Amino acid sequence: MVQRIYEAAAYQAGSLDGCYWVDTAPAGRRYPALDRAATADVAVIGAGFAGLSAALRLARAGRDVAVLDLHGPGWGASGRNGGFCCLGGAKASRQGMIRRFGADQHAHFRAAERAAIDHVEAVLQRYGIDADTHSHAGEVQLAHSAAAMRDLRHHADEARQDYGLSARLLEPGDLPGQGMAGHGFHGGLVLPAGFALNPRKYVLALAEAALDADVRIHADSPVTSIRQRGGRYQLATAQGRLSARQLLVATNGYASDDLPDWMRALYLPVQSSIIVTDPLGPDQIAAQGWSTDMMAFDTRNLLHYFRLMPNRRFLFGMRGGIGWTGREHRLIRQKIVAHFHRMFPAWSQVGISHFWSGLANLTRDLVPYAGPVDDWPDAFAAFGWHGNGVAMASWTGDQIARRMLGQGDDLPGFFSRDPRRFELGRHRRMSLRAAYAWYGLTER
Ligand SMILES: Cc1cc2nc3c(=O)[nH]c(=O)nc-3n(C[C@H](O)[C@H](O)[C@H](O)COP(=O)(O)OP(=O)(O)OC[C@H]3O[C@@H](n4cnc5c(N)ncnc54)[C@H](O)[C@@H]3O)c2cc1C
């Protein structure tokens, strides 16, 4: 029995309805379902950035790889995110990470964040992928309060130390001149790293590259059980079976507590939702004073992230929500639109053409996991990008594949720690309710 912690609708094909990226890059190709008994060297569960990046490296090294997905490549978070290819991947504080894993490991992780961006850039170039990139000057973090601006001043120093980046502070009075006028911004910090992309174009092109390398990709092939027998992994899907010597579980926010049982409560999927506006005319852009194409996000825990895309549509995302029901979605939509109008009042009459949600994923330690599945030989899992997986999931997928090939990899040591479990078992998302209520009160 597959055990997931959100309502069934979150995992059904229709949960992608309303996603803007589908209009920009419809799935041209049909991927066959696995409908017979098959074998492979490696079975990969999950055709997102992590699973496909791993499959690509493994196949290019000569492994026979089969990738199975609930619905198809990019159906999960990878084809429906905000497209910020940026620093990140953990939610643990800087001090917490140093205390728990040591200064060297912390430094290693910071280097990995930068390497992850470079990895995506190199993949786009290598495979000639046109993913509508922009914001090559990096991203800006905007302070939502005067206290948050004081914190950003410290972050500027840390960014210099941790990433070697010449982070640049923007005082409140600087923002209009940078084309960054909005309501309630108390200054900002420009981090010159990363770029924006169309995530669906990127993930579908990754799938094409994997097919070209002879990876077999199966859509509509939900894995329903995994057994280890005779040194091989036996996966049952809705209509078929797959036997493989190596296994990679790359299901992230769409994981199940029993696929395999070891996954139980090791992860906490969290919702994030996005609206996209109709294209904005020059007068509308001038009226609001937001004309930069730089990726932007704010300092709230339930952060807002936004960017003006090359076609002048505005993408505005927000974390929050703990239920996948029609009622909950109507409430989230109302809330995200209200926040958008509050922050960008001149756009309160602008048409909103798209709204959708998806599941990102946390770990109990607030850092990614990429390592063995329990004590199973040759079985691995990679998950927990804390809402920043465009770069980190891609890079980690590629690196874990190196490990599976017996090559040297560059994963920080703590990625393979003995992971801790969340409390409250299958009801663990309820712990988010109190945290979200608190943030709602304290982060206006
Ligand atoms: C709305 C939203 C906005 C985001 N914005 C950003 C952003 O701007 N920048 C950023 O860096 N990150 C962002 N993220 C996070 C980022 O999208 C994810 O971290 C990343 O896509 C995770 O990739 P993945 O391959 O690990 O998992 P996913 O892409 O989620 O793939 C997991 C796959 O596993 C499959 N699966 C699950 N169970 C089974 C099963 N039993 N059998 C077969 N297949 C199965 C699913 O169908 C799914 O396709 C956002 C996430 C969301 C939801």
Image (spheres, rainbow, N blue to C red):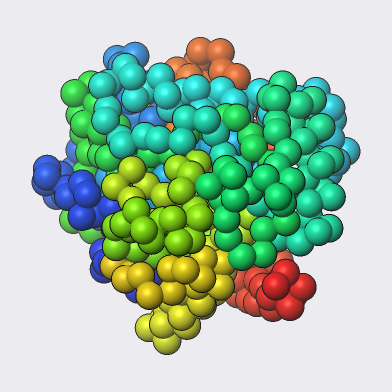
Percent of width and height locating residue 374: 59, 42
User: Which residue is nearer to you in this view: 89 or 11?
Assistant: 89
Q: Residue furthest bottom?
A: 327
State which quadrant residue 276 falls in.
Answer: bottom left
- In this rendering, position of residue 80 left or right of residue 371: left
Q: Does residue 269 sit above or below 24 in this rendering?
A: below
Q: Residue at x 34, y 63 (%)?
A: 277
Percent of width and height locating residue 393: 49, 37
- In this rendering, position of residue 359 left or right of residue 28: right
Q: Residue at x 76, y 61 (%)?
A: 145
Percent of width and height locating residue 400: 50, 27
Q: Does residue 320 sit above or below 25 in this rendering?
A: below
**How many badges with numbers are in the image?**
0
State which quadrant residue 112 falls in.
Answer: top right
Percent of width and height locating residue 105: 76, 27
User: Which residue is nearer to you in this view: 32 or 42?
Assistant: 32
- In this rendering, position of residue 40 left or right of residue 168: left
User: Which residue is nearer to you in this view: 271 or 303?
Assistant: 303
Asked if residue 118 shows in the view, the reply is yes
> Quadrant of the image for the C terminus?
bottom right
User: Which residue is nearer to you in this view: 429 or 78?
Assistant: 78
